[in-house]
Image (cartoon, grey):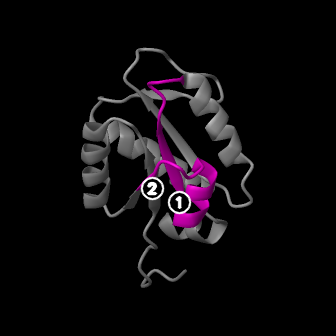
Amino acid sequence: MRASEPTPTRRVLLVAEDRRFRALAGTLLTRRGYTVHVHARGETLAAAAVRTGADVVVIDASASLTAAALEAARLGALSRPVGIVAVSGDPHTGLTALPVLPKWSPFEALLAAVERACAEVAPPEVASAAL
């Protein structure tokens, strides 16, 4: 990608039962240039990630860290890499393979985690263009 070409919009799939968190995180990520999709009930998370072309999935693990880890594993099996960011309102630290951010921490922490996850799954030509 040439320096004069615009950076492609990154897509975030937001998975949270908490409407306040969805609204706030979705609005703030959109203001930072991300396209945000909200996971709809009735569709598997992997199918939603593929359908939306998600670069990163933000999962609220408040209800069950185990369930979030299983979903992350399913996403990891997709042919196109997808970054995972887990958040929780509970004070647990997460798993080694799935660190968890406090859901109500400053937005900059969530943004930094989303940006790291995007960089980790970006194709080499996109990652080098961002530098």
Q: Count residues near mark 1 (Cα–Cα under 10 Å), then give few for <14, some for 14-19, many for 20+.
A: many
Q: Secondary structure at mark 2?
A: strand
Residue at (25% x, 38% y) in the render: 20
Q: Is residue 65 above or below residue 20?
A: above
Tag 2 residue: 12
Q: Which residues are magenta?
A: 38-64
**Tag on residue 101?**
none
**Tag on residue 54?**
1
Which part of the image, by quadrant, shows the N terminus? bottom right
Q: Amino acid at mark 2?
A: Val
Is residue 44 inside the magenta stretch?
yes
Is residue 36 inside the magenta stretch?
no
Residue at (46% x, 73% y) in the render: 8
N-term-proximal mark, 2 vs 1:
2
Residue at (49% x, 27% y) in the render: 100
Q: Is residue 79 visible?
A: yes
Q: Amino acid at mark 1?
A: Ala
x then y, percent, for residue 25: 30, 45
Q: Count residues near mark 2 (Cα–Cα under 10 Å), then give few for <14, some for 14-19, many for 20+.
A: many
Q: Residue placed farthest to the front in the image?
A: 42
Residue at (57% x, 32% y) in the render: 68
x then y, percent, for residue 66: 61, 24
